[in-house]
Image (tube, helix red, strand yellow):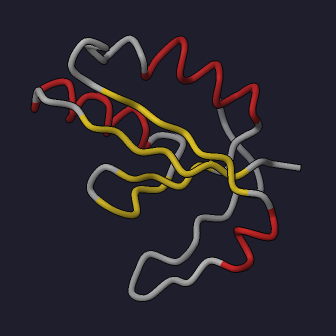
Amino acid sequence: MTDFWLVCYDLRDNKRRNKLAKLMEQRCQRVQYSVFECPLEEETLGFLMENRWLKVLDLSQDSLRAYPLNQTAKKQAKIYGSPPLCEPPDYLIF
């Protein structure tokens, strides 16, 4: 079963911020400017963070956070407006 993560960031530099957003949009759904819903296995999330996303950051100035949401929290989510809660794709092409 795919896990569900709420991932957010705070980056000071526009160039780094834009690069990270483009990388995250490849696998996650942007729900607010710096907040993404990511239906990913924990191993996949770890791989993306270590090998792609964190490489963009300057950790002396920036932060990236991932919060796991269990199925109960996901079902209890209150959403007003769009987009709807992100669902994992039926298939994934690497």
Image point (58%, 72%), residue name: 85
> In screen coordinates, is 12 left or right of 88?
left
Q: Nearer the viewer, residue 16 or 63?
A: 63
> In screen coordinates, is 40 left or right of 2?
left
Q: Position of residue 37 (x, y in %)?
A: 53, 55
Q: Position of residue 84 (x, y in %)?
A: 52, 77
> In screen coordinates, is 88 left or right of 20?
right
Residue 75 picture quarter? bottom right
Q: Is residue 24 above or below residue 32?
A: above
Residue 87 picture quarter? bottom right
Q: Is residue 22 above or below residue 88?
A: above
Q: Is residue 74 above or below residue 4?
A: below
Image point (48%, 56%), residue name: 29
Q: Nearer the viewer, residue 30 or 79?
A: 79
- Considering every residue shown, the one lying at the far front of the view is 60
Q: Position of residue 17 (x, y in %)?
A: 21, 33
Q: Position of residue 83 (x, y in %)?
A: 44, 75
- Considering every residue shown, the one lying at the far left of the view is 14
Q: Nearer the viewer, residue 43 or 72?
A: 72
